[in-house]
Image: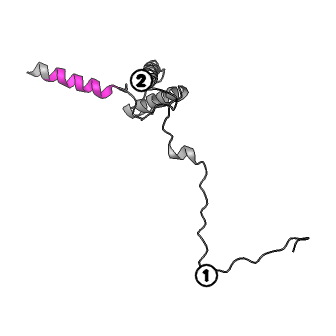
Amino acid sequence: MLQILIILMSVFLLNACSTMPSGPSVLVLPGAAKNFDQFHNDDLLCRQLSHTQIASSQQEADSKDEAQQNYDIIYIQCMYSKGHQVPVPGELMYDAQQEWNSPPPPDMPAPPRTTRPGRP
């Protein structure tokens, strides 16, 4: 019984130290000109590429979250290069904050019309 407990504890400890993601954690959709078979083949190729890149990386990830993030980045880049639709975080879409002006009150008169020289 003690031997089984030791084996189970070592399996749990080894699993806790593992930082290799099992797959992407992002949703990628097929490109407009891609059928399901092309999408499936590209998905398999990009998963393999991501796994290989993470496994052969010189720098070990500090956590499972960091390893997953690195995996997702490689996967997204690969799928994008194959012509598929990939997620884009909102902060990448807008670099600067937009300035919003509130509308004038309803009873405010219109600004006076100015005339340009040479025009009535």
Q: Nearer the viewer, residue 32 or 95?
A: 32
Q: Main secondary structure of the magenta part?
A: helix
Q: CA distance from mark 2 to mark 1?
A: 61 Å
In the picture, measured across the screen, residue 56 lies left or right of residue 102, that is left
Residue 48 point in image, percent of width and height: 43, 19
Residue numbers of the magenta segment: 5-19
Left or right: where 106 falls relative to 37: right
Q: Point out which mark residue 40 bears.
A: 2
**Residue 55 occupies which quadrant of the picture?**
top left
According to the picture, the residue beneath numbered tag 1 turns out to be 107
Which quadrant is home to the C terminus?
bottom right
- The type of residue carrying mark 1 is Asp
Going from the N terminus, do you reach mark 2 or mark 1 first?
A: 2
| Residue 15, magenta (yes or no) | yes
Q: Residue 107 location, x and y as percent?
A: 61, 81
Q: Nearer the viewer, residue 92 or 4?
A: 92
Whether residue 90 is situated above or below residue 79 in the rendered picture: below
Which of 79 and 30 lies nearest the eye of the viewer?
30
The spot of residue 86 in percent (x, y) is 49, 35
Membership of 112 in magenta stretch: no
Q: Secondary structure at mark 2?
A: helix
Q: Residue furthest right?
A: 118
Q: Which mark is residue 71?
A: none
Q: Secondary structure at mark 1?
A: loop
Specify few, some or many for label 2: CA neighbours under 10 Å numbering under 14, 14-19, or 20 or more.
Answer: few
The one nearer the camera, 46 or 117, is 117
Q: Assess disc 1: are there few (<14), some (14-19) or many (≥20) residues with their C-alpha within 10 Å of its C-alpha.
A: few
